[in-house]
Image (spheres, coloured by chain):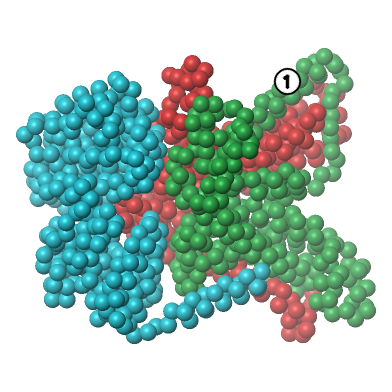
Chain colours: A green, B red, C cyan
Amino acid sequence: MSTVTTTYSDRPGLIATLGRDGLIQIILIANTFIMLAPIVIMIFSAFKTTPQIFASPFGIPDFTNLVNFSRIWTQTNFLQYLINSFVVTGASMALILTLGTMAAYALARYEFFGAGFILMFFIAGLTLPLKLAIIPLFMLMRDLGILNNQLSLIFVYTAMGLPTTIFIMTGFIRTLPNELEDAARMDGASEARIMWSIMLPLVRPAMVIAGIQNVVPIWNDFFFPLVFIQNDRLKTLPQGLTTFMGEYSTDYGVLYAGLTLSALPIIIIYIVLSRQFISGMTSGAIK
Amino acid sequence: MPQLRLTGRGLWITALIVPPLAFVALFVVYPIISAFAYAFFDWNGLLRGEFVGLDNFHTVLFVEPYASWTRNAFSHNIIVFFALMVLQNGLGFFLAYALWRELPGARFHRIAVFLPVVLSTIIVGYLFKLFLHPLFGVVNISLRGMGLGELAQPWLGQSSTALWALIAANAWHMVGFPTLVFLAGMQRIPTEMLDAVRMETRSEWVKITKIVWPLVAPSATVVFVLLFVGAFNWFELPYVMAGLDGSPFGSTDVLGLYFYRTAFGNVSSGQQDFGLGSALAVLIFLFIAVIAGLITVRLRAREIQL
Amino acid sequence: MPSTIIRIGAALAAMSVAAPAMAQDLTFWSWRQEDRAQYEQFIDTFEAANPGITVTLETFEATNYNTILATALAGGSGPDLMMVRAYGGLESIAVPGYLEPLTTETVPALADYTPEALAAETVRADGKVYAVPFASQTQLVIYNKKIFDDAGLSEPQTWDEFMALSQKLKDSGIIPIANGTATAWQNETVTFDFVSSLMGKDFVADIMSGETDFTDERFTSALAALKDLSQYFPDGFIGLDYASAQQLFSSGMAAMFGGGSYELATFRAQNPDLELGVFAAPGRTAEDEKLVALYFDGGYAANAAGANKEAALKFINYLASTEFGQAFADNLNNISTAPGVTFQDPLLAEVAELNATSIPYLFLVNFRYGEPSGSVLIQSEVQKLFAGETTPEAAGQAITDGLKVWYEPFQD
């Protein structure tokens, strides 16, 4: 992605440079503070009682006070929402990566009539805001009998994720060298065998990028569940959160604990894999 | 180029390509084409009635009360787009420029600025709603604590501040995205070009306008288009923070909420109208497609000149 | 992944096998998820008395219920029996012909229901009743008895007394009225909670007969009084959402809450120690009738295309009976509309008594049949009024102009 990384500081005027860099450092620190403060307040508040939150909103709490969390665990469907989100996201990702790799492989490694047109067809899907087709999608799900069923979400997410995945993967697979493939073909290996044992192990980096680019919006989606899913036991986390926030209205400690619990899985994964996340999520925009 | 023959190889390619094609055709292309078709019919609940030509379009654009609702929501999307252009993309550019120097701690700052981007809009919306609560929110409590009690406002309850509160929440949530896209663009600027310009001037401003900005223009095009599409699809944040009616009195109403209300109804007006909803969807869709296309063509043309 | 699909598919198949289409098996849909246990009991009672008929209850989320129901009915997979909304919400389901019309022949008990209750479940065009109305709701003032007693206050008899007691509470550091109006529909409820008596029965009658519109002085002066009263709402109430407002009241921080009878159960659940009282907000003088605003929630209907209509009508007859109404009132703490029901709960009995002098909850009952709905108009105009961005006169004018689009009596 990056050809030459430039880190530069001007040689002339050490004092001026220091002053300018100092200013930049202050701006960055201030910005980082603004970025992190709301999240820190959220996490701190999750360990406080409601009166404590009002009395000292910024105070450091007693981190052993898990009352809010245990109430969420025992009194709400939170765990169910979490499991549902895992099921829906996991199933969608599996489908996206499988189908996306299949199509990308065919488009990148074989020349056949209509390949260009098919690639255009997939790429056209990149730019279409599918939210605006929610009415026909609603009718389609009804006709398929999967309204109020997580399959409706899995199918829509898969269809939404395929264009970007195919776009990223096709580009990547095209860059793979032909030699291995040709050699295997000489040896009489079948096309399926070539794809499975020789080429697929090489495309993993692209799969990670495509995977991250899709997993975040799918995990976070609220709009499609809002329309498709009514049954409380089937709700995903963002949707369940709206139910939960209504029920606990002003028990602030519990509300913050709920938000913290919903945010934490993705925050932790992000911190561990920040480089992959950043390149994955911005890959569509960097060219 | 070998033609597709129904040999083993042809079958193999077909097997690879047809399932993904079927998914996209059934769940993306077909619904979008249907959305266009639906807009030309009268709908009785979920039953399609007769063909009414352009009536639904005429209604949402020119017949009251829809015409003023449409105008009101549309004008808010415009405000959101331009405000975020400055607050989100503009700020993002300067943050990227600051991060580009790779001063100590840059990696940490980079991770921090992108952290909110991975959070769900629902979480961000509720978080800011709690912060902005008129009585118990962190914002008003802090203002009172600092002796600035008169500045404490019902932020989400008055038309003068509600939309701006939403915009601020959105900017906080998403500023990391343009920041890191611009940063990636800057990191690809060849060192020789920078050295060359450094010979000529020591002004940061000249450096930014002459070299950095033109060279990150391709990233800028994509970021602008994405922001444009995002601003005109705005739904989750106003839904969570202002409710389906764009409270107070429609001052935070945007096309996304209005479209949803029209299509699926809300508590206070049990009516749902798939015909008018589809007409709105088609108009929004065409608007986004045309303007996003124009932005891309204009900006791309400029990229080539430079 | 494929195993997930298979598992889900298998689960679905198992469900359809587990619910075989027996001759006398009925399905019953409801949006009252919170009342599930009580409804299961009602169904047990019915099943015991009607061997051979079984009723299966399914509950859905209230906000999307109408969409789900309409979808199912249009797709031919609707339930045999269902809760339906009233007024405009009923018509969207009944007009396409999905519901079985009910007559005093098929459901004799209907003869003893009040005309207002039946009107809520009647389609205006054909005059037929399509559902048995189950509950009425009352918009009134709920108050914290302990706070009133401690401050030596009693239920106000005139508007001036009402203002004075609110001032007294405010002076003693208690929030007089808990309501917040950031949640749009709260603007409609507070209007009828607090100033129904100021509008008066005559005004409402004139509106219903088309003799006047909302520029009428009786309406605009009521709005002016409401705006004046809002000084006793919490600081920043225009940014305060519904749930927080409820919490202010149930936690004892505020003395009064303008709300519906449906809120009594919520407050009791939030704070079992709360001593609740209810009153109708007063008119200008003690002689003015004190009015609450009344409407009907919904009703029980049968599917016109149902396979077991006879059994379904049996169940509808059970739901229309006084026996059921009594059980409904006792177990769900709601005002049943069934004739001859008595209320054991003193608070409920008091609400039932207040219902004797009432006006209809006007914008729901009469103005939700077109776009823009009267409810949407009054909500946004009252919200503007509270924010100081319109006057009572301009609000009345805007509501009238908005309704003119589809409401014929206003069109000349």
- Whether residue A268 appears in this view of the structure is yes
Looking at the image, which residue is at 50% across and 52% down?
A76
Question: In percent of the image, x 25 and y 57: which residue is there?
Answer: C330
- Is residue A238 visible in the rendered image? The answer is no
| Residue at the image point whose x is 29% and y is 56% from the top | C332
Q: Which residue is more in the foreground, C396 or B227?
A: C396
Position of residue C235 in the picture relative to residue C112 (left or right): right
Badge 1, how many Cα within 10 Å: few under 14, some, many 20+?
A: few
Q: Nearer the viewer, residue B119 or B180?
A: B119
Q: Return the x and y of residue C200 as percentages of the image width and height.
A: 11, 40
State the quadrant of the N terminus of chain C. Answer: bottom right
In which quarter of the view is residue C140 placed? top left
**Percent position of residue A3, x then y:** 84, 44
Taking the image as shown, residue A3 lies to the left or right of residue C341, namely right
In which image quadrant can residue A155 be found? bottom right
Where C182 sits versus C304, above or below?
above
Asked which quadrant contains residue B192, the reply is top right
Q: Chain of mark 1?
A: A
Residue at 14% across, 69% down: C109
What x and y, as percent, mark residue C95? 25, 67
Residue in the foreground of this view, choosing between B266 and A110: B266
Q: Inspect the image, locate mark 1, and give the three-letter code of the amino acid beneath it.
A: Leu
Q: Is residue C368 left or right of residue C215?
A: right
Query: Residue A179: horizontal and vertical position, in percent?
Result: 92, 68
Can you identify the residue that label 1 sits on? Answer: A23
